[in-house]
Each structure stands twice: as structure tokens, then as C-alpha cells.
């Protein structure tokens, strides 16, 4: 068989497995970091220092009974978590995570590290993120319960509102890099200014980075923008009526969305897989470090900041973040025009 | 061997389905959905012929059609909401008189 | 290979559209239309128009259909009940609708017949630089710049109109 085909297929398998493992690691990291911030021990019984806790959680969820409310629309009720999880995984398909590698000379032609190399990659990510809204909306609707419906609608409205700032922040980076392909955006960030400041876009585009991270946190329904799934206000929002593996799918989808947003932010603003001291073909290690740093930042924010109320959340998105991102876009355009 | 004809026939079939939908359905929202089907059929024609002629104008027109369709869907749904508030029904047969 | 992909996607699109028109639950209609749009986006990719495909997903499947979904959920649109035949009218009142379906069938027959007379129209082999986003952007902002600006005013008008129309009477 064709060696390149086998290499590509195994790369896809590796990426899929790593995403699942990333979700497990995120579960553990969330609980341990939350514990550290709240000055207590996190899980420490299962496995060394509690590292097998996520697997124990998955086992527990698998053994729970799968409930479905009698008045729920059966087809949509089962479809919603599938849609959420599918959109979350699909968005990662166009994110590159490393330079080309020949696997120590085993391959004839170098294999770019990334599931698919599309030249409109940023638009594809945007499109698939828009499709992810349906999972939440359908979950809220099909549960046929007022808490779920309210949570679902609010969550969908929040995601749509923050998508605008998300897109405009991306547009500013596209203007600077001159291409829609994520691989080219990362390669435009290679090199250093003055010999030691890396050419990452976070330096000229710090406002854009702030906008992107705020919008990303709101898109993934994480604190401080997690009103739609706030335990205290809405029972649990759109996934109130779900149990067992469907519930696990929603949480999987949320964590994978976080990983995707962090990965895209790394590629757009933090230079992707470029970094000091390592050769370019080992760049995926730097990529992992940067994504991990952003994920830690996510968890840190959740357990430090209080939650926004829903109208404050929407006002922030429409009245502050959107005008700021428009101004950022215009300033970037002026800068690109002036400095070439 | 894939020819332009294939795409045009598909587009014609979709357009007719949309037309049948506009005639058949007694629900204002599904009526609007059928209109969207028709617009999409036309989009497909434009993109296919643009590819056949080798110009980019087909895609440009599709861009404008999509934007206009979005604006039309928004206004159409606002009208549907206003009508629903008045008559509590979405059956177009209930809106046959010119005076309330 | 191309033919197989085309027939698969075409069948999916036609089937989804038929179900949108044919079945009675409005929620399912919206979701089936989303499936139809996704299949159309795949057809655009086959036609070497990736930007159009992604734009179709972002605008149609991702924004317009969410709007439809919101309205369906907020108005709690009920399942359509089959009509009660009205004995005082011909065909029980279903005459105009059946005539409409006959006309639609006549339309599709006529269109397919007209297209058969078109003859062989194979696609050109090479793709000129037409499908790159750069080419689209260049043409859009130079030759069609006026239409672009007018479209932005159109969207503003639609925005204001939708808000005013759907507002509750104060």
C-alpha cells in the first residue's frame, strides 16, 4: 500500500486519540487547579496523585442509566449531543499543529502535521463553529423543559453574538498574514525582531488577542460567560435532562471546543509551532506547550472570576467587544497599508 | 462524464420542489423555507455556469444572492412574527381579507 | 468517481428538499433544509468553488437557519394537521393545491426537456485562477464595488425593518 496513505491515516488516528486524551487531561487539570486555587486537595485517591480520576469518571458515567423524558422528541434528543461532539472534533481537522516531518527519513515526501491542509482553513473553522450551535439549541428544545429551553436559547444567542467579534479578530490577522490558510499564517510568524523578540502576532495585535480570547471563552460557554449552564440559576441549562453518555458527550464537546479555540489562538497569535531551542520538525512540542498554557489560562479564569449576568454578557459582546474589534480591524488595515 | 447538464437538471429539480412547496404548504414558515430552496437552486446554477465559462462572476453573483436572501429571511420572519401576534395562526389562508 | 459523488450529493439534496416540502413537523423541516444546504456546499466544492461552499455554510446553514429555528421555537409552531375536506367545494378545497403540484411537475418536465436540447457541455479541464479567494475579492471590490456598497445599505435597511416589524406594540 501507499506509504503516504498509511502515514496520513495513522496521523488522523493519532490526532483523534490525542483529542480524547486531551479531554481527559483537561478534566483532571480542571479539578486539580480548582483545588489549588481553593486551597484544598483535588482528587488524590484514584491512581498516583489522582491521575486516573478522569477514567473513573468516564466509567461511572457509562454505568449510569440513560434517561429520556417522556415528552422529549426522541430523534432530536439523541441527535443533539452527537451534533455537538461531531462539530467539536471536525473543527480540529483543519488546524495544523506542526511543520512538515519525514518521520526520521521513513517517508519519501514530507508529511505536513495536520489532518487536512485547506487553503480556506480559517473560514472552515468559522463555519464548523457556527454548526456547533445547533447541538445546544436542539438539546434545549428537545428536552421539552423550560430550564433547558431557556438555557439553550440563551446559549445560542450568546454564541451568535460573540461570533462576530471572533470573526473580526480573525480578519485582522488575515490582513496581516495575507492568507486564509492557517499554515501560512503560522509561517508568517517565524523569525525574530531585534534578534530576540519573536515575530508572533500577539505583539502587534495584542488588542486582537484580547478580543479573540474573550470571544473564544464566550463561544465555548466557559466562565465568566457560562450563564447558560450556570448551576445556581438554571439548574444546568440545556443539558439538564441528559444523563450518562449523552451528558459526557456534551462535556467532551465543550472541552474539545476549548482545545480547538486554544489551538487556533496559538496558530494565529502565538506563532504556532515556532519556538527557540528546538528544530522546526520538533515544533509540535512548542505547539503543545502553548496550547497547554492557554488551557491553563481558561481554567484559571473559571475559578477566579465571578460570572457575568446574561444582560451584562450580551452588552459586553455587542457594545464593547464588537466596536473594539471593528476599530482593531481598521487600525490593522491602516498599519498594513502604511508599513506594507 | 460529468457535464454542465447534470448540474442544471439538478438545479431545475430543486427549483420545482421549492415551487411545489410554496403551493402546497399551509404554514408560513415552511413557505419561507421553500423560497430558500428556490434561491439555493438558482445559486447552484450560477456557480455551475460560472465554472463552465471559467469566470468568477458566477460566484460574485451568488455572494450577492446569499446576502439578499439573508436580508429577506430576516424581514420575512419579522413579518411572520407580527402576523402571528395578530391572528395566533400561521396558516396563510387566515390572512385572505384585506381588512382586519 | 466524480459522477458517483455528484449523484450521491444530488440525491441527498433532492431527498432532503422533498422531505422539507413533504413532512409536517416544522422543526424537522428546518433541520432537513440544513442537511440540504450542507450537501449543496459539498457540490460547490466539487465545482471548484471552496469559498462559496464555506460561505454557504456560514451564512445559510449557520445564520439564516438559526434564525428560522429561533422563530419556530419561540412561536411554538405546531405540527401541520391534515386538512379537513370542505364538502361545499370541488375536490374538498384541495383543488388549488393539487393544481399547484401539477404546475410544478409541468415546470420540471419543461425545464428538463429544454436542457436536454442543450447538447454535450463538458467542463473545461483546467481551472483558471477563478476560484481563489484573492480573485473573488479583487473582482468584488473593483468591478462590483457599487453593488457591494449598496448591499451593505440593504442589510442595514433589513436590520432596522426586522426590528421595527417584530417589536411589540408599546
Image (cartoon, coloured by chain):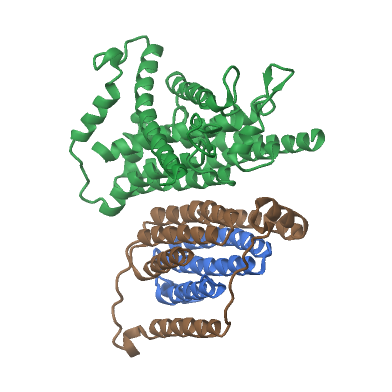
Chain colours: A green, B blue, C brown
Q: Residue furthest bottom?
A: C90
In the image: residue B69, left or right of residue B20 = right
**Where does the image place residue A269, in percent across and percent down from the top left?**
61, 29
In the image: residue A311, left or right of residue B48 = left
Residue A20 seen in the current view: yes
**Where does the image place residue A219, in percent across and percent down from the top left?**
48, 37
From what the image shows, is residue C155 above or below residue A326?
below
Q: Quadrant of residue B30?
A: bottom left
Quadrant of the frame with the C terminus of chain A = top right
From what the image shows, is residue C111 above or below residue A260?
below
In the image: residue A98, left or right of residue A329 = left
- Camera-side residue of B20 and A310: B20
**Where does the image place residue C121, in percent across and percent down from the top left?**
59, 76
Name which residue lies at 40% across and 72% down. Answer: B25
Name which residue lies at 53% across and 83% down. Answer: C116
Name which residue lies at 31% across and 34% down. Answer: A235
**Where does the image place residue C118, in percent across and percent down from the top left?**
58, 82
Residue A243 seen in the current view: no
From what the image shows, is residue C165 above or below residue B8?
above
Q: Which residue lies furthest to the right in this view?
A: A338
- Camera-side residue of A190 and A214: A190
Name which residue lies at 54% across and 37% down. Answer: A110
- Camera-side residue of A122 and C95: A122
- Camera-side residue of A48 and A150: A48
In the image: residue A2, left or right of residue A336 = left
Q: In which quarter of the image is residue B92?
A: bottom left
Q: How many labels does the image show?
A: 0
Amino acid at each position: 500500500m501507499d506509504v503516504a496513505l498509511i502515514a496520513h491515516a495513522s496521523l488522523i488516528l493519532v490526532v483523534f486519540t490525542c483529542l480524547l486524551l486531551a479531554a481527559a487531561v483537561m478534566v483532571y487539570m480542571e479539578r486539580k487547579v480548582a483545588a489549588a486555587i481553593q486551597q484544598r486537595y483535588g482528587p488524590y485517591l484514584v491512581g498516583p496523585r489522582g491521575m486516573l480520576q478522569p477514567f473513573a469518571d468516564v466509567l461511572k458515567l457509562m454505568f449510569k442509566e440513560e434517561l429520556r423524558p417522556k415528552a422529549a422528541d426522541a430523534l432530536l434528543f439523541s441527535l443533539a449531543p452527537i451534533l455537538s461532539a461531531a462539530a467539536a472534533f471536525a473543527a480540529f481537522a483543519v488546524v495544523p499543529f506542526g511543520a512538515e516531518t519525514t518521520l526520521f527519513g521513513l517517508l519519501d515526501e514530507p508529511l505536513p502535521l495536520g489532518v487536512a491542509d485547506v487553503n480556506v482553513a480559517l473560514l472552515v473553522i468559522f463555519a464548523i463553529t457556527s454548526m456547533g450551535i445547533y447541538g445546544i439549541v436542539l438539546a434545549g428544545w428537545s428536552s421539552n423543559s423550560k430550564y433547558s429551553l431557556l438555557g439553550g436559547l440563551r446559549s445560542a444567542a450568546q454564541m451568535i453574538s460573540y461570533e462576530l467579534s471572533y470573526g473580526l479578530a480573525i480578519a485582522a490577522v488575515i490582513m496581516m498574514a495575507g492568507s486564509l490558510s492557517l499554515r501560512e499564517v503560522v509561517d508568517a510568524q517565524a523569525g525574530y525582531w531585534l534578534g530576540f523578540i519573536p515575530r508572533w502576532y500577539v505583539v502587534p495585535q495584542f488588542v486582537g488577542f484580547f478580543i479573540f480570547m474573550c470571544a473564544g471563552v464566550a463561544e465555548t460557554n466557559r466562565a465568566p460567560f457560562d450563564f447558560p449552564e450556570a448551576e445556581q440559576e438554571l439548574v444546568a441549562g440545556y443539558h439538564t435532562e441528559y444523563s450518562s453518555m449523552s451528558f459526557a458527550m456534551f462535556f467532551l464537546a465543550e472541552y474539545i471546543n476549548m482545545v480547538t479555540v486554544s489551538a487556533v489562538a496559538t496558530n494565529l497569535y502565538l506563532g504556532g509551532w515556532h519556538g527557540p531551542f528546538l528544530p522546526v520538525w520538533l515544533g509540535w512540542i512548542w505547539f503543545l506547550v502553548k496550547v497547554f498554557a492557554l488551557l491553563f489560562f481558561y481554567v484559571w479564569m473559571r475559578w477566579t472570576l465571578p460570572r457575568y449576568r446574561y444582560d451584562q454578557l450580551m452588552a459586553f459582546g455587542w457594545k464593547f467587544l464588537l466596536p473594539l474589534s471593528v476599530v482593531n480591524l481598521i487600525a490593522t488595515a491602516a498599519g498594513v497599508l502604511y508599513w506594507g | 462524464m460529468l457535464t454542465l447538464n447534470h448540474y442544471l437538471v439538478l438545479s431545475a429539480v430543486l427549483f420545482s420542489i421549492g415551487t411545489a412547496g410554496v403551493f402546497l404548504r399551509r404554514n408560513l414558515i415552511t413557505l419561507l423555507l421553500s423560497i430558500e430552496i428556490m434561491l439555493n437552486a438558482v445559486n447552484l446554477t450560477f456557480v455551475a455556469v460560472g465554472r463552465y465559462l471559467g469566470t468568477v462572476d458566477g460566484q460574485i453573483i451568488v455572494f450577492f444572492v446569499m446576502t439578499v436572501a439573508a436580508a429577506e429571511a430576516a424581514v420575512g420572519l419579522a413579518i411572520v412574527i407580527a402576523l402571528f401576534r395578530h391572528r395566533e395562526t400561521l396558516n396563510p389562508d387566515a390572512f385572505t381579507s384585506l381588512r382586519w | 468517481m466524480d459522477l458517483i459523488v455528484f449523484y450521491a450529493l444530488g440525491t441527498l439534496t433532492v431527498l432532503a428538499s422533498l422531505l422539507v416540502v413533504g413532512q409536517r413537523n416544522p422543526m424537522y423541516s428546518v433541520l432537513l433544509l440544513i442537511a440540504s444546504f450542507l450537501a449543496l456546499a459539498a457540490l460547490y466544492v466539487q465545482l471548484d468553488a471552496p469559498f462559496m461552499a464555506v460561505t454557504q455554510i456560514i451564512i445559510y446553514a449557520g445564520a439564516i437557519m438559526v434564525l428560522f429555528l429561533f422563530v419556530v421555537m419561540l412561536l411554538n409552531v405546531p405540527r401541520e394537521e391534515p386538512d379537513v375536506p370542505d364538502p361545499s367545494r370541488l375536490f374538498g378545497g384541495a383543488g388549488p393545491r393539487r393544481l399547484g403540484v401539477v404546475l410544478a411537475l409541468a415546470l420540471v418536465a419543461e425545464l428538463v426537456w429544454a436542457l436536454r436540447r442543450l447538447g454535450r457541455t463538458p467542463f473545461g479541464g483546467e481551472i483558471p485562477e477563478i476560484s481563489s479567494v484573492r480573485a473573488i475579492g479583487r473582482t468584488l471590490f473593483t468591478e462590483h464595488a457599487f453593488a457591494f456598497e449598496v448591499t451593505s445599505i440593504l442589510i442595514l435597511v433589513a436590520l432596522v425593518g426586522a426590528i421595527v416589524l417584530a417589536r411589540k406594540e408599546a
